[in-house]
Amino acid sequence: MHRETGKNNDDKDETLVLLKTLENDKLRSDFLHEMKSKWFISAKSERVAKLIGFLSSPSSHLTAMIVEFGEYDLAHFLRNCDKKSIGSDSDRIESNRE
């Protein structure tokens, strides 16, 4: 990334993905505890997006968990996957009754 322009050398778009935000400072301890547990889970698994860290803005009192940006979003995945592999347990129960 160029320090002066903030643009990437390879001209690819980079996007930060907010996983969760905190507005109420009274919940900060719970928020940080949850963030720590999500970080450990994401560090152990290749199948889970990595929790990068957090952003904090003292002026707006907002804190946000940041996860890595994948090559494909959920909508893209859902459009292109085998529709038979998607469903909830209740869907499977209903189809077994028929």
Image: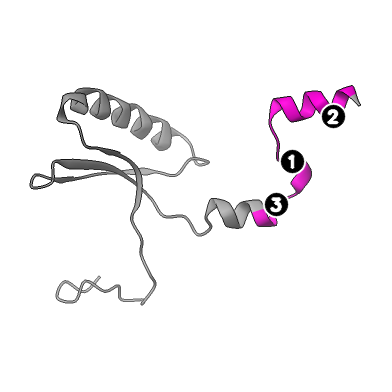
Compared to 37, does 13 lie above or below?
Answer: below
Q: Earlier in the sequence, mark 2 or mark 3?
A: 3
Q: Earlier in the sequence, mark 2 or mark 1?
A: 1
Tell me the quarter of the image containing the N terminus.
bottom left
Given contact means CB atoms under 8 Å apart, are the residues at marks 3 and 1 in contact?
Answer: yes
Instruction: Name the residue: 14% across, 75% down.
Output: 4
- Percent across and percent down for residue 33 are 27, 24
Residue type at numbered disc 2: Ser
Q: CA distance from mark 2 to mark 3?
A: 20 Å
- Percent across and percent down for residue 91 are 75, 30
Instruction: Name the residue: 26% across, 42% down.
Output: 64
For disc 1, the neighbor class at 10 Å (few under 14, some 14 to 19, many from 20) is few
- Which residue sits furthest left? 59
Decide whether residue 84 is among the magenta residues: yes
- Percent across and percent down for residue 54 are 24, 43
Compared to 60, does 44 lie above or below?
Answer: above
For disc 2, the neighbor class at 10 Å (few under 14, some 14 to 19, many from 20) is few
Q: Write the start and end of the magenta stretch as one range.
A: 79-97
Instruction: Name the residue: 53% across, 41% down.
Output: 47
Instruction: Name the residue: 18% across, 42% down.
Output: 62
The tag on residue 85 is 1
Residue type at numbered disc 3: Cys
- The residue nearer to you, when weighing 36 against 87, is 87
**What residue did someone put label 2 on?**
95
Q: Quadrant of residue 84?
A: top right
- Main SS class of the magenta portion in the image: helix
The tag on residue 94 is none
Compared to 62, does 81 lie above or below?
Answer: below
**What residue did someone put label 3 on?**
81
Tell me the quarter of the image containing the C terminus.
top right
